[in-house]
Each structure stands twice: as structure tokens, then as C-alpha cells.
Amino acid sequence: MPFFSILMPTRNRGYLLRDSIQTVLGQDFDDYELIICDNNSHDDTRQVADEALAKSNRVRYINPGKDLSMCANWEYVLDHAVGDYILYVSDDDALVSGALKFVYDILTRHKAPGGNAIDVLTWQRGGYGHPDLSTAKHRTRLFLAFRLRSGNLYNVSSQLMINNLCDFESQHPNYHFVIPKMLNCAVSRNAILECKTHTGQFFVPPYPDYTSVCQLLATHDTYQVIDTPLYVCGISIAANSGIFYKRMEKVKSYFALFKPGEISFDGVPYPMEFLTATYLMMTYLKFQKLYPDSFKSTLNIDNYLASLATELSGYQQIGDDVAHEMEKLSNYMREHYGNDDLLHQHDANAISGRIKATAMFHLRQFAAKNNLTRGLASKLMQVAGIGAPDARQYSNVESIIEASKIIGRDLKLDQRQVAQLEPISIQAPEQLPLLA
């Protein structure tokens, strides 16, 4: 049996899939299987998969023969995996060059607290804008950004992260980069089977990535984080990460594939059909029932409402007509607080945030020119309090394959001494900035 099962669920994104596959097949490690799970696509996905099958006998292709929801498709490919550890790679994402061997070395050389094998190993990411993005609407087209990070290995308290989920990221907004969403981690088969024994299926609606987070946190006291970017999160028009393109149409299309009754707003306070925060609230309420001993934290309604306002502000910034949704949220706030002052205060904060984001964008573009400008921009961002000294930016990166190689080159993974890592425990909120 292979050590890794790398699972690649896909649907009608053949033009993205080809490059993502190549970042797996190009790894300097071969004890794995790659399963391409084609969710009944109608484009050239099968042709792209056949190209991969011709290149490597480690590749398998499966197709359920009917349209599945994303959760059902992720579950379908999971049921076909035979590896000791499971990784998911989205069809618009990439593994960093050298990542698989690096992860293998950590899993085979280190233990979880108590001396058991590591069940859940999570890592950081870089971000890349695919060529299909509109330069006018999304300024990260062909742009690669990441941080070298500390390289430390952390033992992170699951309860600490559950508390942050239920708090709706009020204090530490970067926590969602280091929770185990299956796209950024390796998970043992035994850990997944334990979850399925409890809930019947691993990927519970509505979002497979966040329900897997809740499953794994609820069944483990701690999980491990290697503070290194080992995958590239791609942003494209076609993918969910590009939801700022035709947002409402994408949301309707996504949920149309679920079975009747799988998605319900019953019990969800102040629901907003087209905003992610509502579905996260739905998820956490569901897991309070599934795992009452683990999900004991109080859900922060104030921060939930603020999260809704933040989302709407972001869509408004790119030109979405959010007037109806703003009015609905204003009514919710008047119902909850007696007024909608918080919404107006949030608008003022959003303007400040946009100014900061614009300054960051221009500095990143300047940094991407060459090594000299990269160093100067890094210092300027540190002085302004909007950047990290280990930040890296590259412009005109033609493909996610190239992005994968750039990060691998800059990280020098082959020179890192995995055996010398000393795990650091993160148990308290004041330690979370280590992962920010």
C-alpha cells in the first residue's frame, strides 16, 4: 500500500487540472497514489486525466457517473484511497516542489504528544493568481506571494482552535490558515475512520473543508503544524476561491447539487444566503450536536454579525450590488442591538482597511521586480506595520507549476534538518501569534 493517497476531486476545470497534476507528478518522492476524481465533467477533464495516466502508473481515474455535491464527491474519492495518509489537492492548487518528501520525513521521524504516530499534520500556504483572472478586477493575476515562515513544528491545542472557530476569529484572523482543511494537511487513515465511525461520513455538509476541520479537532486533543508553506492556493475565475466572480450564481450552483434537506437554515441566527459566515455558523451549530463534549464554546453572535459585514464590504469593494443584503443586515443589527451603528462603524473601518490593502498591493508589486526592490519593500512594509520580514513576492509567474518551483527553491526544503526539529506546544491564546 502507498504511504500517501493524494486525492484530487475535480469538476469541469480541465484547463486548471493539468498543471495541478504536474506539481504532484513532479515531486521527488514516489511512495504515493494520485486519484483523480472527475465529478461527471463535461469538458476535457477525462483527456487531461488520460495524459496523466500515460505518464505514471501511480495515477488512477474514477468518475461516479452522476453529478455529486462537493461533499459527496470528496467522500467518494476518499472511499477509494488505500494510502496510510490522505492528502487532498484541489484542481486549481499545487504542491510545493519537494513538499511530499519533506512531509514524509516529518511523519516518520516525529511523534505526537504521548508517543503515538502523528495523525494530523498541517502546513502553511502561498497564494497565486491564475492567468484566467481579470487584471482589471483582481490585481493578483500571475502574482505569487508567500512567507518563508519559521520552519518550526508546533503541537497545537484543538480546543484552542475550536474556541477561535466559535468566536468567529475576533482576535486571531489568521487561524484558518493553520486548521486542518484537508487541502493543507496529511491525515492518517485511522483518524478518518474514527470520525466516520462517529458521524457515518467524514465530509458533512455544507463545506467539506470546514467540516473536516471540525471532525479532526473534535477527535484529537492536539494536532501538529509545520510552519512552512507547502502548498500553493490558486485563485481562478472557475474555482470557489474566485467567488468574487458571479458570487450568487456560484453559490446557487454549489448548493443545487446537494440532496433535499442537507442544507437547512433552521436554527441559524441571522442567515444570509450568499455569505460564507452563515454556512460556518451552520457548521458549528451542527458540530455542537455531533460532538457536544468538544464543541462547548459559546458562538459569538457579535463577531458573527461583524463577519457578515466584512464579507459584504469586500464584495461591495469589487463592484457587487449589495444594497439589498446591506439592508437585510442592517435590519438584523437593529433587531440584535436596537440600532445599526455597528454597521456604520464597520464601514469606516473598511475604508481604512482598503487604504491599507491598496498600500500593501503597491508595495508587493514593487517588491516583485527584483531582489533589491524586494528587500527595500520589505523594510517599508515593516515600518508601516503591514508586512513581515520573510515575505516574498513575484510578479508575472506564468503558471502554478512555476509558482510551486519558486517556493520550493526559496525554502530549500532539501537542506532543512527535520530530525532536529523540537516541537513547540501552543496551548494558550497569547501563543497564537506564532502562527499568524
Image (tube, rainbow, N blue to C red):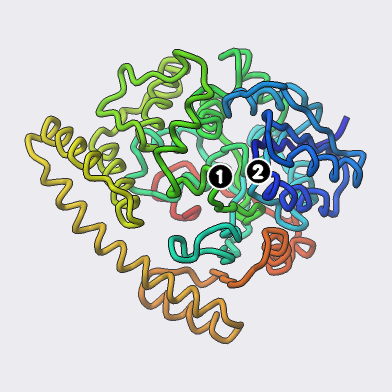
Q: Residue 383 in the image: state x and y as whole percent.
A: 38, 78
In terms of image quadrants, where is residue 385?
bottom left
Q: Which is more toward the observer, 292 or 183?
A: 183
Counting labels gives 2
Residue at the image position 76 percent from the left and 59 percent from the top:
417
Q: Secondary structure at mark 2?
A: loop
Judging by the rendered image, the residue that carries numbered circle 2 is 13
**Residue 149 percent coordinates (x, y):** 58, 61
Residue 44 lies in what quarter of the image? top right
| Tag in front: 2 or 1 | 2
Return the residue nearer the eye: 276 or 124. Answer: 276
Residue tagged by mark 1?
A: 239
Query: Picture coordinates of residue 67 (x, y %)?
Result: 62, 24
User: Along the horizontal axis of the image, is 63 left or right of 218?
Assistant: right
Residue 76 lies in quadrant: top right
Residue at screen point 53% across, 41% down: 179
Tag 1, which secondary structure? loop
Q: Is residue 82 left or right of residue 149?
A: right
Q: Is residue 232 left or right of residue 206?
A: right
Seen in the picture, residue 119 relative to 321 is either above or below; the reply is above
For the point 36% across and 37% down, which residue is it?
275
